[in-house]
Amino acid sequence: MSDYKRILVTSALPYANGPVHIGHLAGVYVPADIYVRYQRMRGREVLFVCGSDEHGVPVTQRARKEGITPQQVVDRYHSLIKKSFEDFGIGFDIYSRTTSATHHEFASQFFRKLYDDGKLIERTSKQYYDEEVQEFLTDRDIVGECPHCGNPDAYGNQCEKCGRDLSPEELINPRSKRSKSTPVLRETKNWYLPLNEYEPWLREWILEQHKEWRPNVYGQCKSWLDSGLQPRAMTRDLDWGIPVPVEGAEGKVLYVWFDAPIGYISNTKELCEREPGKWGEWQKWWQDEETKLVHFIGKDNIVFHCIIFPSMMKAHGQYIMPDNVPANEFLNLENDKISTSKNWAVWLNEYLEDFPGMQDVLRYVLTANAPETKDNDFTWKDFQARNNSELVAIYGNFVNRAVVLTHKYFGGKVPADAKPEAIDAETLAQLPQIKAAIEDYIEHYKFREALKEAMNLARIGNKYISDTEPWKVAKTDLDRTASILYTSLQICANLAIAFSPFLPFSSAKLQQMLCLDTLSWDQLGNAGILPAGHQIAPAQLMFAKIEDAQIDAQIAKLQASKAAHEAAAKVSAPAPAKAECVFEDFEKMDIRTATVLEAEKVPNTDKLLHLKIDTGLDVRELVSGIAQYYTPEEMIGKQICILANLKPRKIKGIVSQGMILMAQQPDGKMRVVSPEERLDNGATIG
């Protein structure tokens, strides 16, 4: 740290298409917040930047699904996400958005500089186009069979089943998510960043200069570089995003992964212009080599933050590079992958409602079980066990006993160290060791181990007060009791400091109990923070026990979500394939076009229509159970397809000669099959 004057910390911009869930928190925001709080306690100049990513494809997909505009989607979720972060104690210095005027202007200028400097190449390529909706499709709007694992619903950029990165052209039998039709390849012009030109520099910068990066980050970067980098499009054919600021780019916007990371810079600029006296010029944070830049991200964002964004900044020529990119693995939920589409998630806003005042419990559990080196699993039973057996029974129990006994025997004043013994000194001697361990772990982005050391301090305190039993000693030796409680209170004060980066709310509560105005990191390890005679406040409950009923309710909520999704999937699933038939069977069917001449409801029925049709061969009558889908007026004049040689059958007294061909959707809705263009009546189909 001595090589830097300041630290700039960014955390991945969440898509403003839904709430934040525990996977996001464990992967990105809690570790980033711990790191920032720790550095601030060290007295270092730190800026913590984030904001909503509002131009991603998921936003437009949500808007289409709900029948509203993308702007309405991002306005709703930006506010929800921002408030959730604030209530949870994530201490961003600025949480802005990529639809802000500042960002639009800044991202446009950034692109224009690369364009004017000749750093972008213009290229015409073939991309998938949906002829029904008349739009080019994004990678996430194309699905098909994964060539690696056979998943029939792999996206055009990634298979979520096997995790492989894909391109749309690799998909087998691609289809549009927009219209369900088969897309066609059509030529379009876009501007590309030639990543291949930056490959030698990236190899030196990452593979040689940053071997200390986490194995998952280093390994993924090496894999990309060893595979050979290719030019990547920085623009897209879309109508939602920042318009490309060059001539001939009508109907194109900046690629979201060009636009979004620039949001870190534009948000910094917005903050510095709003509070110049506090933060100074934005350039010192992004263009001064004495600034340490750290990106906190999830593993699915590694390539963008380690390959693409650095190449963009290198092409620009005026920006510093990240010192580290600590990316976590994924957090699963109850032994299953978190899925927003399946509502298989613990949403932060709902957690805050269901467990008011228990932000630190979730922060503790997510850090203790952080997926730093491998995917980990969150279960509600483990959440309950860690709270009850660790936070309540160890940390909270120790603090409560120390504070309650101090009030009982010494009127709430820190007693003098009247009769020390060896166990006191031996216990307090461990404080500097724990401080050093926490510092080393946090500086190396090992937050799970750092939290373990903080909890070890609580275990030491709990064991010490249990072993010395001041409630028994007080019956015969009040001086010795004074020393025990003096020692215990010093450990309490150290706990308030040690846990501050991890559990800010409970640390603040403990600080209030101890009547300490300020605490600094430098005091951690000090065995005399609280002087004799210092008045402390009455004990407060640090943590509350979580009952089985609370956990059962959460598990039931998840199971209800799963059941609802499975039911919906069952309804929307296509009907199973029928048994094979031979061509000769098909040849027996005489399928022809016909036009409806007259139509009326069959009396005393709800589902039947009586139709008179012109088959080209004759005019005949038939009865069809389509009254719940079509009115008689809608059917008159409609050209339909019929099975003309079906054996006549009398229905409600009417001889029905034929059957209309219908298409039944998975949800049960039926539509008449009609020719794409009007044909002569009697045209055969086969």
Image (spheres, grey):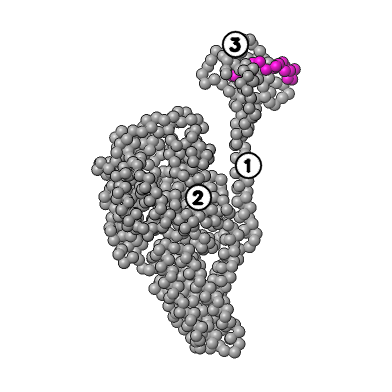
Q: Tell me which amino acid carries mark 1.
A: Ala
* Numbered disc 3: secondary structure: loop
Amino acid type of the residue tagged 2 in the rendering: Pro
Quadrant containing the N terminus is bottom left
Residue 553: name its quadrant: bottom right
The disc labelled 3 sits on which kind of residue?
Gly
Mark 1 → mark 2, Cα distance in angstroms: 23 Å
Mark closest to the chain's N terminus, 1 or 3: 1
Instruction: Answer whether residue 270 is visible to the viewer in this image.
Output: no
Count residues near mark 3 (Cα–Cα under 10 Å), then give few for <14, some for 14-19, many for 20+. Answer: some
Judge whether 487 appears above or below 542 on screen: below
Question: Residue 19, which numbered label?
Answer: 2
Residue at 63 percent of width and 19 percent of height: 584
Magenta segment's dominant SS is: strand
Residue drawn at (57%, 61%) of the image: 383
The residue positioned 42% from the left and 33% from the top of the image is 128
545 drawn magenta: no
In the rendered picture of this protein, how many numbered marks are placed on residues? 3
Give the foreground label among 1 and 2: 1
Q: Which residue is mark 1?
A: 567
How far apart are labels 2 and 3 at the CA level?
59 Å
Find the magenta span and give its range: 639-656
Q: Residue 497, percent across and down?
A: 45, 71
